[in-house]
Amino acid sequence: MGLTIHYKGELKNASDLKSLIDTVKDVAKAEKWDYFVFEEQFENNSFSEIIDKENLFGIMISPPKCDPFCISFLSNGKMSGIINFNVMQKEGEINEDLIYAVFSKTQYSGYENHKKLILLLDHISIKYLKSFECIDEGYYWETRDEDLLKKTFEKYTNLIDSFTSSIEMITINEGENLEDYLTRMAEITNKNLK
């Protein structure tokens, strides 16, 4: 649970990887965000038909209280995040529905960092990416409406706070199964939010 940015796309040119990394690294340094650089160059400076299951290419930044924000790619030039890459390595197979989907929860990092990440995605998607798609649960990608972004953050925060409070205050009844308990808790929480 928590406000998240979902995105996917492909690098236009294998030779652009270093420049893209430098751009993202500059933003991370300016914001004083931690970052980690994966591989900086594709083999022979070109994409590969066969996916290299040992190496991820690109960069990962870490704004405070935010999931890792990956601008990273598989050897075929398609975006993949560190979590999906690690799952692929463990399972040994590629699930195309999952491997190319990248996401980062920004809920606890605040709307300002969320906005900065969306603006970064906008810049790099125009300059370096193709077939780029973004689903922003804060709606800033689609609208550029900062007030809507703030309200959405408040709504998610209130929902999480209400849920946490509900867990603390609404106890499970004797003999009540988990599903019935969660349903009852959701009904009480929804009533209190109105």
Image (tube, grey):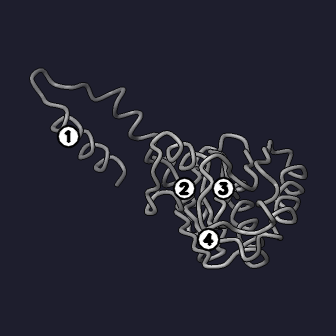
Disc 2 marks a residue whose amino acid type is Thr
Left-right relation of 128 to 94: right
Q: Label 2: which residue?
A: 4
Please state the horizontal and vertical placement of residue 121, each as a whole percent of the image.
71, 67
Q: Which disc, if any, is residue 95? A: none
Q: Mark 4 or mark 1, which has the lower sequence index?
A: 4
Marks 4 and 1 sit apart, C-alpha to C-alpha, by 41 Å
Q: Mark 3 or mark 2, which has the lower sequence index?
A: 2
Marks 3 and 1 sit apart, C-alpha to C-alpha, by 31 Å
Q: Residue furthest left?
A: 175
Q: Label 3: which residue?
A: 111
Marks 2 and 1 sit apart, C-alpha to C-alpha, by 27 Å
Q: Nearer the viewer, mark 3 or mark 2?
A: 2
Q: Secondary structure at mark 1?
A: helix
Left-right relation of 135 to 184: right
Q: Secondary structure at mark 4?
A: strand
Q: Secondary structure at mark 3?
A: helix
Quarter location, residue 25: bottom right
Q: Which disc, if any, is residue 184? A: 1
Of 135 and 8, nearer the camera is 8
Q: Nearer the viewer, mark 4 or mark 1?
A: 4
Q: Residues within 10 Å of mark 1 (few under 14, many from 20)?
A: some
